[in-house]
Amino acid sequence: MDWTACVGIDWGDQEHAYEIRGRDGGQASGKTGSSSEEFHEWVRRLRERFPTGTIIVAFEHGRWSLIYALMVYEFLSLVPINPRASKAYRDSLRLSGASSDPADAAIICDFVLKHLSKLRVWQPDDAITRKLRLLVESRRTLVDQRTAFTHTLADTLKQYYPQALQWFGGETTRLLRAFLMRWPTLEQMRTAGLEDITAVMRAQRCRKVSAAAQGLIEKMGLAVP
């Protein structure tokens, strides 16, 4: 790849550290603000410093907001690197494993320059593929949240109301949530009548509702808080 400069960026919430190394041997480092205005102004100044040729911008993979901000510039070649690769490279240079934004930006830049021939330049997907990827990422986030909430619910019930997990099929069932919404404790559950229990089970489309409701009444009578 024919390039005039390589930039390593360590992305942060409030500001981003960078390391710039020109093909002519020049070197600079610093930080830029995270706002859209500040960041695009930084890119403009970068182009003024290197007015011709391609500028390589390297960063850890997964920084999609950074990719979306930089993909509009034709003179930039974006090279995302695997975070595990950058960590392994950092650990090989610093046995303490210490990390700082400016130092990490320099390590990213150094890593890319030494392995440029083996790294892939990022190419944008078409609009439909980008939309699909964002939807998949959102779904995965929701699934992870649901899993975390479910585990929290199970742990909480084990502490004060473990019978609910046994009676209603476990922490993932709609039947459990329906009963907890009405009677969140064993003491409150014991105040429920047969008709109320039957109604909840029927609303959740349980099988053999009458027998199941009667069986639950019997279990409630034997349960120990």
Image: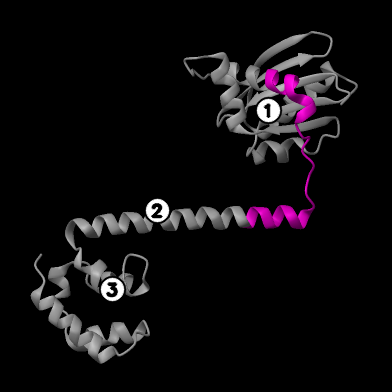
Q: Is residue 124 left or right of residue 135?
A: right
Which is more toward the observer, 63 or 80?
A: 80
* Residue 57 on the magenta span: no
How crowded is the residue under tag 3: few (<14 C-alpha within 10 Å), some, or many (20+)?
Answer: some
Examine the rendering and report whether any part of residue 31 can be seen.
Answer: no
Residue that numbered label 1 is attached to: 38
Q: Is residue 112 shown above or below 200?
A: above
CB within 8 Å, label 3 to label 1: no
Residue 71 coordinates in the image, percent (x, y): 78, 38
Identify the amino acid type marked 2: Ala
Identify the amino acid type marked 1: Glu
Q: Earlier in the sequence, mark 3 or mark 1?
A: 1
Q: Toward which corner of the image does residue 209 lie, by quadrant?
A: bottom left
Residue that numbered label 3 is attached to: 168
Find residue 29 and name its label. none
Q: Secondary structure at mark 2?
A: helix
Can you tell which of label 3 and label 1 is closer to the viewer?
Answer: 3
Residue at x 57% of width, y 25% of height: 88
Find residue 148 and name its label. 2
Residue at x 80% of width, y 8% of height: 25
Q: Toward which corner of the image does residue 208 lie, by quadrant?
A: bottom left
Q: Is residue 9 left or right of residue 52?
A: left
Q: Secondary structure at mark 1?
A: helix
CA–CA distance between discs 2 and 3? 20 Å
Q: Which residues are magenta?
A: 109-135
- The kind of secondary structure the magenta stretch mainly shows is helix
Residue 154 coordinates in the image, percent (x, y): 29, 59
